[in-house]
Image (cartoon, rainbow, N blue to C red):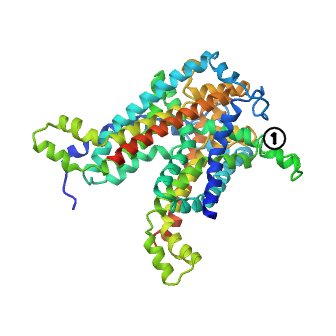
């Protein structure tokens, strides 16, 4: 039962919320305002959507937008495919080893994306330990991965995988062993148990893991910058280019707003689309 | 068995790039990335010849300490209010507190840059610290809430009944019992802020560059294993912090 609480029960929330409003919401308001303002490249009278029309009207920038969505979607799919079985196996590992392995998952998160991406630059370089043996054995011709979308996806799968495994593991470990045994003793095969018991029960976890992976991938800056470079711009690296190279604050604001809108649309759409499956 | 092998491969994938950094930091080759030539310590020694890296480590430490302190300080009362009573709209407020996770960091940095520009003020390190604090707050709120969810509030009530004041109860009963969440939240916040690049990208000057920004700037002009040596040091520090954190958790589990 919800008793009516005195206002003082809410008071401790105020400082944190005010801080978020001052240093996140108000600044985002400034960006939104600038995205509607004229600039040296796009001239218009009153506040309007001309910057967005300008970006969407150029094939080059439209490519950047599509690439951002494509990379994030592919990353999400691959991270889920690799992460689901991993989280499932992790569930049967002894508690002691399991907790060590969970800590192991956080190492790349704690080392920071910059350090990890440096490692990928070595691994994916032309003469690196992955490509050179393949070329030597004649399995492939000269292969260039750095500076391609593939390299960005590899980096982002690596970056999002720990979050995906942790999210899926939290849901999978809640499924009681008894339930699986009951299904098995009632004659269900391994595959049937997976398909009819484990998978449906884990769906909420799959949906949140997908949302986390997509948002992380779409908002990542470090992987696209170092593994993709100037020829494979995404919305994040485009924002940086507008600020650091071409000094167009208004177009940077418009690109940033576009990124936020794309993410909001995908998150909202995906949640809506999967709501029924999750509830059933 | 197949499951174990699969898991081992996944961990190899996760740990691989970090291992490469450590190996390459001892590489005598003068370009990066390049095949391993012969082992050397020169890159580690070279760090000390670069004043800008040492200064940036100091800046990063100040920013990360301040951001973690602000985030923990604001998260504690909020988490307490959210866990103590079932508040009307409590779920929505809890979601608001993790909201910063959904905003791309590069956009947070841009937004702060543009607000400061429009307002025509220069906060120095203040703007940078504020953005970092916003970014790490979701982690401190979540970790402290997890700790509070296991806290038996009747203990605090008992202390009050026995005559302890509000402050004494907080200091002698509640805080010690949720220490794990506070320490974990603060440490996690510190590390996440320390290693972050995109939040700071638009908010630093050469004088106020953080360590990741200094690495970024260095790599724009030339790339050699020096950055790998710094990366390896950051990695080792992060591992040390994590192991310490785990010890803290062990202590709690042991009673």
Q: Nearer the viewer, residue B58 or B16?
A: B16
In the figure, is residue A7 to the left or right of B107?
left
Question: Could one spot residue A30 in this view of the protein?
Answer: no
Q: Chain of mark 1?
A: A
Which residue shows up at 67% across the image and 19% down it? B46
In the figure, is residue A126 to the left or right of B168?
right
Residue A109 drawn at (x, y percent): 55, 42
Which residue shows up at 46% across the image and 24% down it? B62
Question: In the rendered image of this protein, does residue B2 appear above or below residue B142?
Answer: below
Which residue shows up at 24% across the image and 52% down it? B85
The quadrant the N terminus of chain A occupies is: bottom left
Number of callouts: 1
- Which quadrant of the view contains residue B211? top right
Which residue shows up at 60% across the image and 35% down it? A250
Residue A260 drawn at (x, y percent): 55, 46
Question: In the rendered image of this protein, does residue A94 appear above or below residue B66?
Answer: below
Task: For label 1, count other residues whose C-alpha is less than 10 Å away and answer few (under 14), some (14-19) or many (20+).
Answer: many
Q: Nearer the viewer, residue A197 or A97?
A: A97
Q: Nearer the viewer, residue B139 or A47?
A: B139
Residue A83 drawn at (x, y percent): 59, 58
- Secondary structure state at the residue bearing disc 1: loop
Question: In the rendered image of this protein, does residue B53 appear above or below residue B38?
Answer: above
The residue tagged 1 is: A126
Question: Could one spot residue A89 in this view of the protein?
Answer: yes
Residue A26 drawn at (x, y percent): 44, 36
């Amino acid at each position: 039962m919800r008793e009516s609480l005195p206002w003082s029960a809410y008071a401790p929330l105020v400082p944190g919320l005010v801080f978020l409003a001052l240093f996140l919401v108000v600044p985002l308001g400034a960006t939104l305002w600038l995205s509607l303002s004229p600039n040296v490249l796009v001239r218009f009278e009153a506040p309007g959507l001309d910057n967005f029309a300008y970006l969407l009207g150029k094939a080059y920038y439209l490519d950047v937008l599509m690439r951002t969505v494509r990379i994030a979607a592919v990353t999400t799919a691959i991270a889920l495919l690799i992460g689901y079985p991993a989280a499932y196996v992790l569930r049967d590992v002894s508690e002691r080893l399991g907790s060590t392995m969970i800590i192991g998952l956080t190492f790349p998160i704690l080392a920071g994306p910059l350090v990890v991406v440096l490692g990928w630059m070595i691994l994916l370089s032309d003469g690196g330990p992955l490509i050179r043996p393949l070329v030597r054995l004649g399995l492939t011709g000269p292969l260039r991965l750095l500076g391609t979308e593939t390299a960005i996806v590899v980096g982002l799968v690596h970056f999002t995988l720990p979050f995906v495994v942790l999210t899926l593991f939290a849901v999978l470990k809640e499924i009681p062993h008894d339930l699986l045994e009951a299904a098995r003793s009632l004659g269900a095969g391994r595959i049937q148990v997976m398909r009819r018991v484990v998978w449906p029960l884990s769906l909420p976890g799959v949906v949140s893991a997908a949302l986390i992976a997509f948002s992380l991938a779409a908002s990542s800056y470090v992987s696209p910058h170092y593994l993709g470079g100037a020829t494979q711009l995404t919305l994040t690296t485009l924002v940086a280019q507008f600020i650091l190279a071409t000094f167009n604050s208004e177009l940077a604001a418009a690109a940033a707003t576009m990124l936020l809108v794309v993410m909001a649309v995908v998150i909202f759409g995906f949640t809506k689309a999967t709501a029924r499956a999750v509830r059933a | 068995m197949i499951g174990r092998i699969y898991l081992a491969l996944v961990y190899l994938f996760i740990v691989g790039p970090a291992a490469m950094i450590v190996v390459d930091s001892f590489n005598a080759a003068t370009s990066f990335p390049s095949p391993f030539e012969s082992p050397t310590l020169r890159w580690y020694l070279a760090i000390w010849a670069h004043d800008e890296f040492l200064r940036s480590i100091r800046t990063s430490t100040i920013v990360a300490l301040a951001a973690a302190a602000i985030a923990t300080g604001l998260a504690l009362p909020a988490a307490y209010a959210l866990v103590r009573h079932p508040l009307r709209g409590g779920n929505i407020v809890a979601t608001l507190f993790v909201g910063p996770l959904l905003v791309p960091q590069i956009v947070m940095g841009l937004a702060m840059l543009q607000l400061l520009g429009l307002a025509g003020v220069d906060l120095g390190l203040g703007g940078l610290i504020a953005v970092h604090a916003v970014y790490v707050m979701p982690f401190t709120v979540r970790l402290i809430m997890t700790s509070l969810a296991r806290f038996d509030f009747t203990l605090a009530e008992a202390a009050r009944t026995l005559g302890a004041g509000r402050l004494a109860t907080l200091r002698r009963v509640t805080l010690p019992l949720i220490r794990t969440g506070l320490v974990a939240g603060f440490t996690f916040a510190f590390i996440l802020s320390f290693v972050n690049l995109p939040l700071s990208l638009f908010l630093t000057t050469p004088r106020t560059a953080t360590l990741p920004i200094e690495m970024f700037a260095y790599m724009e002009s030339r790339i050699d294993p020096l950055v790998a040596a710094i990366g390896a040091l950051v990695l080792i520090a992060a591992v040390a912090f994590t192991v310490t954190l785990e010890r803290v958790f062990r202590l709690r589990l042991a009673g």
